[in-house]
Amino acid sequence: MSENIESPGPPQTPIAIFDEFLVAEEWRHLLNYTLRNAEAFAATHVIGASGESRLDQRYRRSKVLFDLGPFHQLFVDRLLTFLPHVVSRLGDPGFGVSQVEVQLTGTNNQEFFRIHTDNDSAEVSGRRLTFVYFFYREPRGFAGGELRIYDTLREDGQAKAVGPYRVVYPLQNQIVFFPSGCLHEVLPVGAPSGDFADSRFTVNGWFHQ
């Protein structure tokens, strides 16, 4: 796993990475489900400071599907099974989970998500832990799309990136967990074919406290 992370200096923000989150048959079926439902994906929105959801392609470009069909419960169950190991690695004392929010995202050519936190507005303030599960068609038809996670401090209620950061590369069937209050971003993806099937796919979401 150490080959999947680079950092300029010693980052302080804890993250937890697990390989082989799904068995091979599961992620292949997930990929098939994703490709079969390509037309159902919609442009992603961002949540503004006052809680409104809006389209802002200067800030975020990708497509999302909220209906994971049979894979929703598979992920919720698997995530809850992993949670004790996650909080142990993160040094988190643990918390009661009120909800597990799950969505499926495809990021294609010249798409990205600028630096942000996941729980700054009141509507999503219950998000405690973020997870990002990576999968894609093989051979991989994209480059880039790294997840950059910043050491973060809060000053006057605002998140501020400080010091080093971590870069997590999208690797097949791998999942990363980190605190939802950390600033992070998805670096631009290059997928020359422009084919949706060549996207950087993730199942991503949040444990709510």
Image: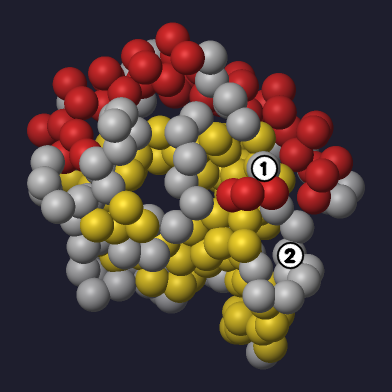
Q: Which residue was labeled with disc 1? A: 1
Q: Of label 2 and label 1, which has the lower sequence position?
A: 1
At which x and y percent is residue 47?
Answer: 38, 64
Residue drawn at point x = 32 percent, y = 44 percent: 200
Q: Is residue 64 left or right of residue 150?
A: left
Of badges 2 and 1, the one in the foreground is: 1
- Mark 1 closeness class: few <14, some 14–19, many ≥20 residues within 10 Å: few
Q: Can residue 125 be seen at all in this image of the molecule?
A: no
Marks 2 and 1, how far apart in space? Answer: 17 Å
Which one is in front, 32 or 83? 32
Residue 13's disc is: 2
At which x and y percent is residue 50?
Answer: 41, 73
Residue drawn at point x = 50 percent, y = 30 percent: 173
Residue 50's disc is: none
Looking at the image, residue 6 lies above or below residue 163: above
At which x and y percent is residue 147?
Answer: 49, 58
Check the picture and name the quadrant holding the N terminus: top right
Name the residue at the bottom extreme. 156
Snapshot quadrant of residue 113: bottom left
Snapshot quadrant of residue 53: bottom left
